[in-house]
Amino acid sequence: MKNNDNIKQIIECYLAILFISFLFFGSIYIAGEITGSNEIFSHLPEFSWDMVNTWNEIKNKSS
């Protein structure tokens, strides 16, 4: 029975952390929308497959 209590407590803890994180990041996003300065995603770089190393590049750099 004690194991079930621990699992229940762990799940409650994770749910509380998830909820608090959602509130924190959600409030940042909402504040950005309200002020009109929500350009968070424009600051992130655009990723492409050219940035990923191939096995041939990895082998050639190590030798």
Image (cartoon, rainbow, N blue to C red):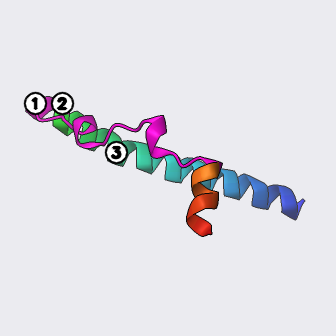
For mark 2, what is the residue?
33
For mark 1, what is the residue?
36
- Please tell me which residue lies in front, 19 or 34: 34
Say few, some or many: other residues with alpha carbon within 10 Å of mark 1 (under 14 / 14 to 19 / 20 or more): few
For mark 3, what is the residue?
25
What's the amino acid at mark 1?
A: Gly
Find out whether residue 59 is within the magenta segment. Answer: no
Rendering quarter of residue 43? top left
Say few, some or many: other residues with alpha carbon within 10 Å of mark 2 (under 14 / 14 to 19 / 20 or more): few
Residue at position x 29%, y 42% from top?
44
Task: Please state the horizontal and vertical placement of residue 57, each as a whole percent of the image.
Answer: 57, 53
Tell me: residue 60, above or below residue 24.
below
SS class of the residue under badge 3? helix
Task: Please state the horizontal and vertical placement of residue 15, each as a whole percent of the image.
Answer: 58, 47
What's the amino acid at mark 3?
A: Phe
In the displayed orientation, state which residue is furthest to the right.
Answer: 1
Residue at position x 10%, y 30% from top?
36
Rendering quarter of residue 31? top left
Tell me: residue 25, above or below residue 36.
below
Which comes sooner in the sequence, label 3 or label 1? Answer: 3
